[in-house]
Amino acid sequence: MSHTLREHTADVAVEAIAPTLPALFEAVADGLTAASCEAVPEQGDRFEFTVTAESREALLFDYLDQLIYERDVRLVLPDDHRCTVSRSGDAAGGDSAAWTAEATARGVPLDAVAAREIKAVTYSEMTLERRGDEWYAYVVFDV
């Protein structure tokens, strides 16, 4: 799995590829961390959270938005991301499908890093798709 930071007018974008959907979520989150800070010390405590959404794209958005929220509330830079992604329900059977991400991250105290503020994740130009045997994402963050 990998991520690449891309220049974007007044924003920053993360482009990521991974062999699985959970690994893709982790790669994009790693990109969010890299966009925030060049060097991350090995300190901080793990925290966990769960998000649920109606689609994969909405789940990726909500997952990243929750990481930004956790940063603001806990005053930490989320790093060392771990995530599982699952789907429940069956839209074809009349039930509404729901996608869930169960995640953990290590919260590095903000006073231990020189972090640039990422204000928000955006739907602008967001792409999340399977390409052959890999997953691909492109996500723009407002800085």
Image (cartoon, rainbow, N blue to C red):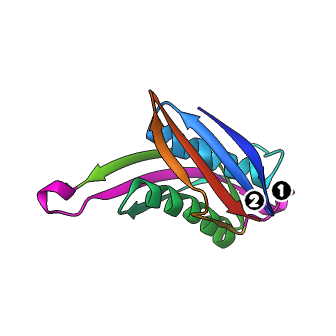
Relative depth, front residue between 130 and 72:
130
- The magenta stretch is 89-118
Image position, residue 44 (x, y; %): 69, 52
The amino acid on which the numbered mark 2 sits, given as a three-letter code, is Pro
Q: Is residue 85 above or below residue 76?
A: above
Q: In this view, does 68 lie to the left or right of 57?
A: right
Image point (13%, 62%), residue name: 94
Confirm or deny contact between disc 2 and disc 1 (CB under 8 A): yes
- Write down the residue under mark 1: 112
Q: Is residue 34 left or right of residue 136?
A: right
Image point (64%, 72%), residue name: 73
Quarter-wise, where is residue 53 in the image? Answer: bottom left
Residue 94 in the magenta stretch? The answer is yes
Image position, residue 136 (x, y; %): 54, 40
Image point (83%, 62%), residue name: 111
Label 1: state its secondary structure. Answer: helix
Distance in Å between CA atoms under marks 2 and 1: 5 Å
Q: Which residue lies furthest to the right in this view?
A: 114
Relative depth, front residue between 21 and 110:
21
- Write down the residue under mark 2: 109
Q: Quadrant of the N terminus?
A: top right
Image position, residue 69 (x, y; %): 61, 69
Number of other residues with Cα within 10 Å of mark 2, as a class: few under 14, some 14 to 19, many 20 or more: some
Label 2: state its secondary structure. Answer: strand
Residue 100 in the magenta stretch? The answer is yes
Q: Quadrant of the C terminus?
A: bottom right
